[in-house]
Image (tube, rainbow, N blue to C red):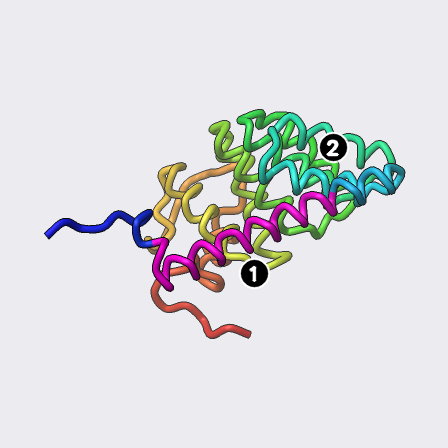
Amino acid sequence: MEQSSPLRRLDGPAGTLFAGSALFVLAVIVFILWFLWRNHRLLTANPQSHSNVEIAASYGGTDEQEIRELQKALSIKDDFAIRANLGNAYEELGRFPEGVAEYNHALQLNPQYASAWCNMGYALMREGKLDEAIPDFMKAIEYDPRMPQGRTDLYKALQMRGIDPGAANQTGSYPFDLKKALELLKTYPPPGAANQPPER
């Protein structure tokens, strides 16, 4: 018996429902993108409108277009979240030094922004600068211990540095506070680790 292809099944009730749902979702996405672009045209002096266009560009534009829109937004108003988003855009392109510079600027505006600490640590880790990345992950955990990525990245960075985060009696001299890093991971283990403390 010949199996019917998914396209042949579109003529039945289930296929019609699937096709209708897909077209509805597509229409909603097109409407949202149109609304963001319209909003941007009406409010070019509003940094949030450029940030919104960057979000829209991330779904169908280019990375360079995202960067241009975020730079326009920052020319209107210097904002820590927009700076961090620009850092993310640079990081996605593998332009880690530029990403680190934007994260640093974001942290000058908001030193407790845990995501920027974590993302800066990740960019530094990708550059092989583990001794600089580890303290950034520690800061991310200190400011937001529930953020799983900071805990996971700290664990990975220590392993990449040749340190077993689960081993007892760690010794050695490091340009970061190893004892504090291990205490943070003991108190706030990465997701999936055994003996996690209860959520607070």
Write the start and end of the magenta stretch as one range: 10-36
Magenta stretch holds residue 139:
no
Query: Would residue 114 be found to the left or right of residue 157 on screen?
Result: right
Where residue 72 appears, x then y in whole percent? Answer: 80, 31
Quadrant of the rendered image containing residue 87 = top right
* Kind of residue at disc 2: Glu
Quadrant of the rendered image containing residue 105 = top right
Mark 2 is surrounded, within 10 Å at the Cα level, by few (under 14), some (14 to 19) or many (20 or more) other residues, namely many
Where residue 74 appears, x then y in whole percent? Answer: 81, 35
Query: Would residue 35 be found to the left or right of residue 190 on screen?
Result: right
The C terminus: image quadrant? bottom right
Which of the two discs, 1 and 2, sits closer to the camera? 2
Mark 1 is surrounded, within 10 Å at the Cα level, by few (under 14), some (14 to 19) or many (20 or more) other residues, namely many
Query: Disc 2 designates what residue?
Result: 69
Q: Which SS class for mark 2?
A: helix
Tell me the residue at 86%/37% (across/down).
44
Front one among 2 and 184? 2
Query: Disc 1 designates what residue?
Result: 145
